[in-house]
Image (cartoon, helix red, strand yellow):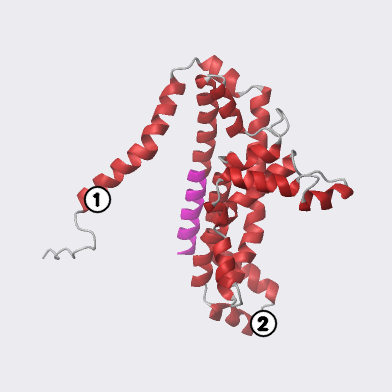
Amino acid sequence: MKQPRKPGVIPGFGLCLGYTLSYLGLLVLVPLAALIIKSAGLDWAWFLHTVTEPRVLAAYRLSFLASFIAAGINVVFGAVAAWVLVRYQFPGRRLLNAVVDLPFALPTAVSGIALTALCSPGGWIGGLAAPLGIKIAFTQLGVIIALTFISLPFVIRALQPAIKDLDPAVEEAARVLGASPAQTFLRVIVPSLAPALLTGFTLAFARALGEYGSVIFISGNMPHKTEIAPLLIAVKLEQYDVAGAAAIAVVMMAAAFTLLVSINLLQRRNLHGTA
């Protein structure tokens, strides 16, 4: 006998699915399809020449490398911050938790101006680093700092729910069984948080890869040195080279999509392995 269908909170699955697909299609798929169609009409030899120019390759290298480093830094320090915000109670905790979302709320241009002022030779941070022979603003180090700043919330927000679901009794059981703090951390905590860490890293990397506003001020925008790929796309558009901008954008989109799909496959394999 067929079981009666339980009423859902939102009735009409077909109607809701249609709205969902239409909404995502208009906001995501249509613009991306237009970009692909624009690049598909280009000459293949010209496309390869455009996306492999030395200036473009240098911009790719800096964008991917700086994004990877920034996401890696945030995985380490973001995990510590998320652990403190979830596991400990202290005065100002709610305020600190709200500050985490500040890079979301600030316009990226404001973030870039503030970081440039801090990291320039006359700024608070740059003034301390200058006597040591370390230059931050208008260097690749400045790019990494800007990308680290804007991508930090993604790691913390991805880890907080996972840390809340982590039962402290499991850690206590490990200690009772004779595990050292290092063994408890490496064999109990890290495997439990690995999917959330991977998600946070991916989101931070993807966010940093497409960042523009906060980087253009602190980087100095020197070709072959501190020029990122999103800036190069903007430069192409200012020069009315729409085809060149589309070619570079397609390469960036393909790389980001490949990364996201690979991470999703790794997460699925990890979940199946755990089950």
Cα separation between marks 1 and 2: 53 Å
| Position of residue 18 in the picture relative to residue 86 (left or right) | left
- The correct choice, above or below, for 64 with respect to 96 in the image is above
Q: Residue at x 40, y 27 (%)?
A: 34
Query: In this rendering, is residue 63 above or below 233?
Result: below
Left or right: 25 with respect to 255?
left
Amino acid of disc 2: Gly
Region in magenta? 260-275
Residue 17 seen in render:
yes
Q: Which residue is mark 1?
A: 16
Judge the density around disc 2: few (<14), some (14-19), many (≥20) Cα neighbours within 10 Å: few
Label annotation for residue 178: 2
Task: Answer yes or no: is residue 68 visible.
Answer: no
Q: Which mark is residue 249?
A: none
Please provide percent x and percent y for residue 104: 53, 52
> Is the C terminus in the top left, top right, bottom left or bottom right quadrant?
bottom left
- Residue drawn at x 18%, y 64% is 7
Could you tell me if the residues under marks 1 and 2 are in contact, i.e. CB atoms within 8 Å?
A: no
* Closer-to-camera residue (178/139): 139
Mark 2 or mark 1, which is nearer the start of the sequence? Answer: 1
Name the secondary structure under disc 1.
helix
> Seen from this angle, which residue lies furthest bottom?
176
In the figure, is residue 1 to the left or right of 143? left
Q: Is residue 16 magenta?
A: no
Q: Amino acid at mark 1?
A: Cys
Nearer to me, 57 or 128 = 128
The one of 223 and 214 positioned closer to us in this rendering: 214
Q: Position of residue 250 (x, y in %)?
A: 50, 29
**What is the residue that sits farthest to the left in this orientation?**
1
- Tag count in the figure? 2
Q: Nearer the viewer, mark 1 or mark 2?
A: 1
Residue 16 in picture, x, y percent from top left: 24, 50
